[in-house]
Amino acid sequence: MLVCNFAVQSHTMKIIRAEHLGMCFGVRDAITLAVKQSAAQPLTILGELVHNEAVLASLQEKGIRIQHDPAAVNTPAVMITAHGASERMMNRVRERGLNVTEATCPLVRFAHRAVSRLVEEGYHPVIVGKRDHVEVRGLTEDLKEFDVVLADADVDALQERPRFGIAAQTTQPLERVRHLVSLIRRRFPRSEMRFVDTVCQPTKQRQTAAIELARRSDVVIVIGGAHSNNTRELVATCARYCARVHHVQNAADLQPEWFAGAETVGITAGTSTPDTLIDAVEVQLRELSSRLGSISANTSQNKDELEYSVASDAV
Ligand code: SF4
């Protein structure tokens, strides 16, 4: 329950949702598959299916186990997450004689195929992404040679190669990927360069919608797990266009003082954030408005655009 202990100016607070936000089809399908498989036999998921504690807790409540090492799996069935895995990891799992289900997102598979093709065609593979991220490990663990770049300094550290083949972790902001690709081009003008855009469509849509949202908002609330890479990327993107951006994991994290004087509050969420959490945050914002004063409850049925009035004498 939110308690407001400060005075707020009278204003109308408009709450808007990003046009694209929240859980992507890849994560949604993986969760559905995990629940279905676990009903047939005890299941262990290898790694975090999603970087969201609420979702993981609800899976564990259904008896689904989570392990990071195949050697620690003691159920007959094991699932590879939407992030995918290398062949090396898959072999470790198969060697244990486990019943393997792959929930690898088709767009991650596309990235795997793109990297394999670049290598087959003689390009030195460079992945734009986070070196320790599970998806990047899956993309690189089978490669003899590769580089991972995330910042300008990583490009400075690259050795010259006759041919560079560049792909990206699916959840990287396209702006960053394009920047690093052009930096590599400029740094190695004599090298042949090939870039395959493997940033997934849901990530692009969420990033573009987040920019649009942040431009229109006085305050932006980004909902997602503390360890969710794409949620953090959304926070960073919004912060370039809006000075008041807050990352919350759930409705209880909302602080009333964040909204002082705000006319428009934008909501967006990472690709592992379930609808229930997004709805709960919106409900809590509505409750906050009501506690601050009386809501002039614009009872618009349009869920994407609700308006609330905040009274001046609220405490
Ligand atoms: Fe697939 Fe993109 Fe979702 Fe990853 S973020 S699971 S690549 S749709």
Image: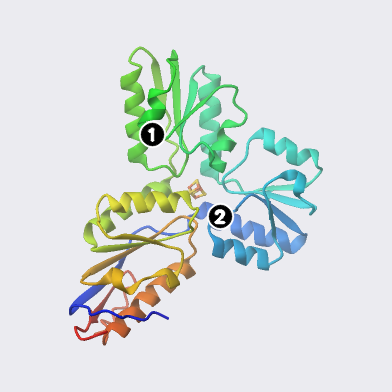
The colour scheme of the drawn protein is: rainbow
Q: Assess disc 2: are there few (<14), some (14-19) or many (≥20) residues with their C-alpha within 10 Å of its C-alpha.
A: many
Question: Percent x, y for residue 31?
Answer: 60, 58
Label ID, residue 151: 1
Image height of 307 relative to 18, above or below? below
Q: Does residue 154 appear in this view?
A: yes
User: Quick check: 253 above or below 112?
Assistant: below
Q: What residue type is labelled 1?
A: Ala
**Residue visible at 70% across and 61% down?**
64
Query: Could you tell me residue 36's position as x and y percent?
Result: 68, 61
* Residue at the spot 76% in from the left edge and 44% down from the top edge: 71
The answer to which quarter of the image holds residue 299 is: bottom left
Comes first in the chain, label 2 or label 1: 2
- Report the amino acid beneath label 2: Val
Q: How far apart are marks 2 and 1 (CA)?
A: 25 Å
Give the side of residue 312 with respect to residue 16, left or right.
Answer: left
Residue 200 placement (x, y as % from top left): 44, 44
Q: Quick check: can you spot residue 206?
A: no
- Left-right relation of 99 to 276: right
57 or 244, which is in the foreground?
Answer: 244
Q: Which of 247 and 195 is in front in this view?
A: 247
Q: The residue tagged with tag 1: helix, strand or loop?
A: loop
Q: In which quarter of the image is the N terminus?
A: bottom left
What residue did someone put label 2 on? Answer: 50
